[in-house]
Structure formats: structure tokens, C-alpha cells
Amino acid sequence: QKEVEQDPGPLSVPEGAIVSLNCTYSNSAFQYFMWYRQYSRKGPELLMYTYSSGNKEDGRFTAQVDKSSKYISLFIRDSQPSDSATYLCAAPYDAGGTSYGKLTFGQGTILTVHP
Amino acid sequence: GAVVSQHPSWVICKSGTSVKIECRSLDFQATTMFWYRQFPKQSLMLMATSNEGSKATYEQGVEKDKFLINHASLTLSTLTVTSAHPEDSSFYICSAPVRGGIGAFFGQGTRLTVV
């Protein structure tokens, strides 16, 4: 079982919709989580990160962690066609460790926002 | 922000030949870099950790003699796919950790096609 699981979708929504992207994790030792966005044939770019006990908002994006159910979410408000990409949740490869750049990823959710 | 540059962005090679992929940190020093592999519509899988001035650390199942990693300077790590075969065709991505922060910066990726 992968430590971070993500529904690959694909997910297709109309412009302006609220998008909910979700992952589950199995290791309660994870201290923080990240969301990355990956455009086709490009490397991932960090959108935001949250610690295992908090929520975070950044513009149209909100990241949420539910420790009790080991569930992490990314919400996108007022979605735009430019948001069309693959969204990857990630956690530290060594849960609880200090190697912050070594990551384990979910499978990624392919999102399409159509005009 | 910090940039990680990867070169080439795509390469086609004949079966049996070797291919070198470069990963550079452009405006910061990276004593550690990571190499990932991504198959179409799948997630990033960590292959190895590249350590400046010492041997790379490979993940289980990754052939160290096939995927040679060299980290000769604080700004450059290279991945050489030796005696490439069609099953080595994939998207290879490098990253460097965010110093003092969370997550990593990723290169643009290299699409390798072995024919």
C-alpha cells in the first residue's frame, strides 16, 4: 500500500466551479503535506504546504488536513482554464524525518477546467 | 525563487547507448538532489538521492549500475542511463530541497525515448 493515495480522476469542471482534490495517507507520523501542480511535460511546482494539524489559504487555494481520518484536501475556488493540470499531493519520504526535500507522492489527479 | 534547470528536455537514443541528463541549481547550492522517474499518467517515483562529493543512495529496486549518478559540484548532479533499453523510456525529473523550508524545487524534466 502506498503511503499517500490519490484518486487519479480525471476530473472535468466548468470555469468558475469549486474544485475539491483529495488524498488519504496511512502514516500518522507525517508532519506536513504539500500540494504540487504539474503541467503537461513539465516538472512539478509547489503550490502550498500544510502542517499535519492545520489549514492554509492562499488566494483561490485552500489546503486542509483532517488528522482523524488521515485525509488531506485542496480546494480551488473560481477555477480557471489555466488551472488545468495534474495535482499531486506529497509527504516526506521519511515520515517524521528532517529530509524535507525527499518526497513521496500520490498518483496525481488530472484536472481540466473548461471555459 | 530558486530555479532548478534540467537538460536536455527531451532525448531520443538508440537501444544500447547511454544518455546523460544534467540537473543544475541556478542560484543556490544544493548538497543534495533527488532523481525521480515518472511513467505516463503515473506519479513520481523516487529513484535515488544524489549527495555532493559522495556516493548516491539508491531506492530499493533501482539498479545503481544502470542509473549512474554523479554529484561533482554543489550546483550540478548528473544521471546517466547506461545501455538504455526501450523499457527505460520515461520522464526523469530532478529536484533540490528548499533550504530552510518545506518541499523541493523541481527541474523541467527530461523525456527519454529509447528506440
Image (tube, coloured by chain):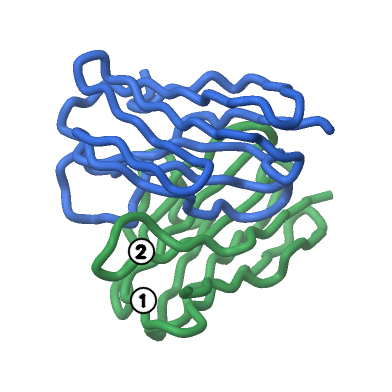
Chain colours: A blue, B green
Res. B30 mark: 1
**Towards the viewer: A91 or A81:** A81
Residue B79 at x, y percent in the picture: 54, 66
Q: Quadrant of residue B52?
A: bottom left
Q: Is residue A12 above or below residue B63?
A: above
Identify the chain of the residue marked 2, using the numbered disc in the image: B
Identify the chain of the residue marked 1, using the numbered disc in the image: B
Res. B97 mark: 2
Res. A106 mark: none
Q: Secondary structure at mark 2?
A: strand
Query: Which comes sooner in the sequence, label 2 or label 1?
Result: 1
Residue A78 at x, y percent in the picture: 63, 35
In the drawing, does residue B10 fall left or right of residue B41? Answer: right
Q: Quadrant of the N terminus of chain A?
A: top left
Q: Identity of the amino acid at label 1?
A: Ala
**Towards the viewer: B18 or A45:** A45
In the drawing, does residue A12 fall left or right of residue A38? Answer: right
Q: Is residue B89 visible?
A: no
User: For mark 2, does the 10 Å Cα neighbourhood hold few (<14), some (14 to 19), or many (20 or more) residues?
Assistant: many
Per the model, the C-alpha gap separating discs 2 and 1 is 8 Å
Q: Quadrant of residue B98?
A: bottom left
In this figure, what is the number of numbered marks?
2
Q: Identity of the amino acid at label 2?
A: Pro
Q: Are marks 2 and 1 in contact (CB under 8 Å)?
A: yes
